[in-house]
Image: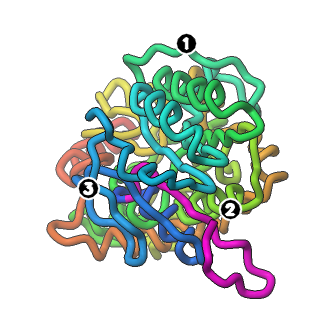
Amino acid sequence: MSSLATPAGAPRPLRLLVLGGTAWLGGEIASAALGRGHEVTCLARGSSGTVPDGAVFVGSDRSASGAYDPVIADGRRWDAVVDLSRDPSHVREAVAVLEPASASFAFVSSVSVYDDTATTGGDESAALVDADESDYGGSKVAGERAVVGAFGADRSLIVRAGLIGGPGDHTGRTGWWPLRFAGGAGASGSDPVLVPDVPGLEVQPVDVRDLATWIVVSVERGLSGTYDAVGDRQSLTDHLAAARRVSGHTGEIVPVDEAWLEAHEVNPWAGPRSMPLWVPVSTHAGFGSRSGGAGRAAGLVPRPVDETLRDVLAWELSRPGPVGPHGAGLTSADERDLLVAARDRRR
């Protein structure tokens, strides 16, 4: 084990192996662990970026033979492994090789593993989709099974993350609304904004910093089991009001319903010509309204959503290049046309 001195009241320093660590959440996990005094090694190809200062980088392609040899050489042991992979073959190989060398294994899964996306308030006991490795949810199910199969329930931590948000959100899903209200997408903070009007639809993004810290603290505590890691539930309407509040928007709000959005070929959730965070309420009301009770009982405490939105807005405005939608949202031209159509409907 580590020879580092442990400050009074601090957790014992761990040897933590992060399979990843160069992209968004993996980097936040590595940073959180370093900040708590742990020794962190990140095994990754390195194509997504660099590891945080203080972490050891091991360049390796997990698809290649002997990918994990550098981190098990000379009988090296780990207190915990954290894996973020969406490729079940990578997870299966990792647990097979690393089980003798690690005390525990934490796998970052997703609430996309649940079969029922319509029912609100679901918890970790809900039925899962089939382990179909051709889609995201099924691949995460297969990864979960591989981890528990190799390490056993008492040495495995399965973290089913909800929508992850906050600074660094390259998907644009949590950053687009505060950016749009702030006028950062080719408009001004007093211009009208088109918003989805979807009664009964809730959202619960979890701040990447809260998720990363909770994963590290859970590993320190030796927590095992399966937990949904989600933010506090709030209506989409309230979430958009928070985004507008932190952005200082003073212009008109133009609400349109789902049928109108679908008729005008606006896509839900993410991607080009989309309304981020909106999903069809009849089929996906439960996607952003899970219980979250087990995670709260295990110590996950989300920060206020205003703080997350304020910080992701600052990050969006600091990004190099043109300010505007990336990964999710409407272009300014698309929104102008849609606003004209929405107003024509009112006449």
Q: Nearer the viewer, residue 51 or 302?
A: 51
Three-letter amino acid code of the residue under disc 1: Asp
Three-letter amino acid code of the residue under disc 3: Gly
Q: Nearer the viewer, residue 194 or 155?
A: 155
* Rendered view: 279 above or below 18: above
Q: Nearer the viewer, residue 265 or 315?
A: 315
What is the quadrant of residue 15 in the picture?
bottom right
Residue 132 visible in the picture: yes
> What residue does disc 3 label?
46
Extent of the magenta region = 1-21
Instruction: Verify whether residue 97 appears in magenta.
Output: no
Quarter holding the C terminus is top left
Quarter holding the N terminus is bottom right
Q: Which residue in the rendered view is the most extreme toward the front?
A: 74
Q: Residue 286 at x, y = what percent?
A: 65, 30
What is the quadrant of residue 313 in the picture?
bottom left
* Rendered view: 342 above or below 26: above
Instruction: Verify whether residue 19 appears in magenta.
Output: yes
**Mark 1, other Cα within 10 Å: few <14 / some 14–19 / many ≥20:** some
* Marked residue nearer the N-terminal end (1 or 2): 1
**CA separation in Å, label 2 and label 3:** 30 Å
**Mark 2, other Cα within 10 Å: few <14 / some 14–19 / many ≥20:** many
> What residue does disc 1 label?
130
Residue at 47% in and 73% down = 311
